[in-house]
Image (tube, grey):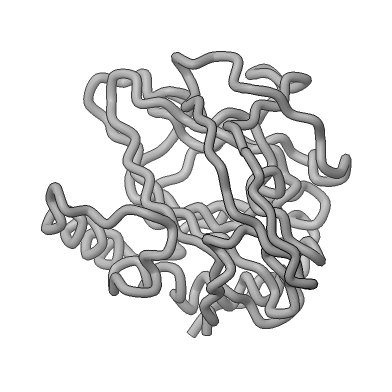
Amino acid sequence: MSVQLTDAQLLHYREHGYLVLPDLLSKEEVDAFLECDRQYGDQRPSGLQNHQSEAPYTAIARHPNVVGKIRQMIGGSPRIVQTMYMAKAPAGGTGVALHQDTHYIRNEPNTLMACWIALSDTGPTNGGLVVVPGSHHDGLQSAGRVRESDQHADWKQDYEMRGPDGEQWTQTMTSHDIHTIGPDDVEYLEVGPGGGVFFSSLTVHGSYANQTTDLPRLAFATHYVREDTWVYRGDLQDLTPAE
């Protein structure tokens, strides 16, 4: 059974836009996912919907110790939008530039939020998560293309979009980078295996390259919306109940 968030924890999330909690997953659960990933080998599943078909992904995305807290934060029944396993290699594995998730996943009403779970020791040296506390209060910020390609992945891709009225169009997206915020403005988080970070879709966050020679940064992220939310990206409209 999920342990519920305290009033103080909920207040921290609402004021700062993120919340770090240890022990969302047990050591045994972390080890079980990593063992399954090793068994995938070169056949590791790709894409953003693996929670619909791969038991290890489903187990984390629907974990009661996560979903119960998401329900509190989101104010209703959550749906899973996407899941991502992110294994950042040592010696320069790049991160994601400073952004807000709403840049990539337009949704109305904007209930989108994420739970990012560390599956290894993560911190500043190996490309751990960084956040900008309180940035969610400033709304959706302007973003440009990636400034530092040695630190962050740089890409461009077309996505099919569909609105609630049935209108369809193609939208070109690029890797976003909020140029008004730099490395000195962020908080560098240290999260151990099984610990997690909850953050809103307007909280500025990202990560930098892995500067270590022998410490991979392993993490798993799930994005959720409340059940009454419309997601515009066609590839993410098949929402899955989280409970």
Numbered-mark total: 0
Residue drawn at (37%, 73%) of the image: 58
Q: Nearer the viewer, residue 83 or 195?
A: 83
Q: Nearer the viewer, residue 87 or 194?
A: 87
Asked which quadrant contains residue 142, the reply is top right
User: Quick check: 85 above or below 125?
Assistant: below
Q: Where's residue 188, x and y in %?
A: 57, 31
Can see residue 113?
Answer: no
Residue drawn at (16%, 53%) of the image: 43
Q: Residue furthest right?
A: 138
Q: Nearer the viewer, residue 128 or 106?
A: 106
Q: Where's residue 217, x and y in %?
A: 35, 37
Can see residue 132?
Answer: yes
Q: Nearer the viewer, residue 191 or 155?
A: 155
Residue drawn at (12%, 50%) of the image: 41
Determine whether, in the image, residue 19 is placed left or right of residue 193. right
Q: Where's residue 166, x and y in %?
A: 73, 71
User: Quick check: 33 above or below 85?
Assistant: below
User: Quick check: 108 above or below 138?
Assistant: below
Residue drawn at (65%, 53%) of the image: 105
Q: Where's residue 209, x and y in %?
A: 43, 23
Determine whether, in the image, residue 165 is placed left or right of residue 86. right
